[in-house]
Amino acid sequence: MLQPATLLPAFAPWLDTAGLAVFAASGALAAARAGQTAVTLAFFALITGVGGGTLRDLLIGAPVFWVHDPRAATVCLLVAAAIWATPQRWWRDAALDWFDAVGLAAYAVFGAAKALRYGVPPIPAALMGVVSACVGGIIRDVLAGEPSILMRPELYVTAAALAATSHVVLVLVGVPVAVAAPLAALAGFALRAAAIRWRLALPAYPGRH
């Protein structure tokens, strides 16, 4: 099985784990806010953390990463346990938004890089980056009965698309992966950070009225 270090630079596993932990936390918190059980918190953490990567791996014909590497599921379950054992006031929405921005950018780049490594053409590879970064959150929102991230006016999926597309374009023009990956992740994070700070949003469909 291809390891993360063969897809991105040596720091990639750390970014991958950090992004996984943040997404798992957002899933566990969604269940915690609804007053659910510890089992439900664990399930939400796992499905949110690995959902996007699972769909990506199935689509590109790769071994599903968390089935073959126990660290991913372990991180999700430990995060769920930590949230279960602590009061909700410790977990500020604003702080999680910023951590989520880091995870979003890192996952988008990692997903696009893995797709390229498996021979996926550039445009689908960029889309696989978006899938990696966003699908887990979509599943979480559907299960929790909350408005989906797809329906939020502020930029979210767009930031993932910028990170994934930037990485693919930089690699195609010959930029080394060790340089392309952090640059692309930084671009995606910067856009998401700006959206959080200034509530940036794309124009809504004008024909509705």
Image (tube, rainbow, N blue to C red):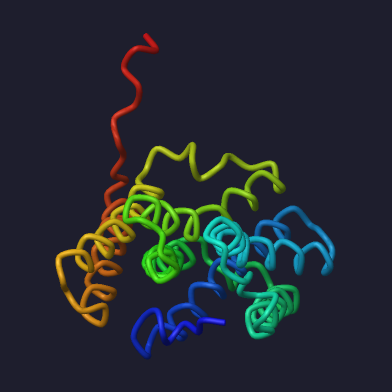
Q: Give the x, y percent position of residue 77.
A: 72, 77
Residue 81 is situated, as x and y percent measured from the top left of the image, at: 74, 78
Compared to 147, does 176 lie above or below?
below
In the picture provided, is 70 more to the left or to the right than 193? right
Q: Residue at x 74, y 53 (%)?
A: 34
| Quarter occupied by residue 145 | top right
Left or right of residue 129, residue 203 in this image: left
Residue 106 drawn at (x, y percent): 39, 70
- Residue 38 placement (x, y as % from top left): 82, 69
Residue 171 falls left or right of residue 149:
left
Q: Nearer the viewer, residue 46 or 84?
A: 46
The residue at 68%/67% (across/down) is 45
For the residue pair 137 and 41, the one nearer the viewer reads as: 137
On the rendered image, what quadrant is the C terminus found in?
Answer: top left
Can you tell which quarter of the image residue 204 is in? Answer: top left
The residue lying at 45 percent from left, 61 percent from top is: 97
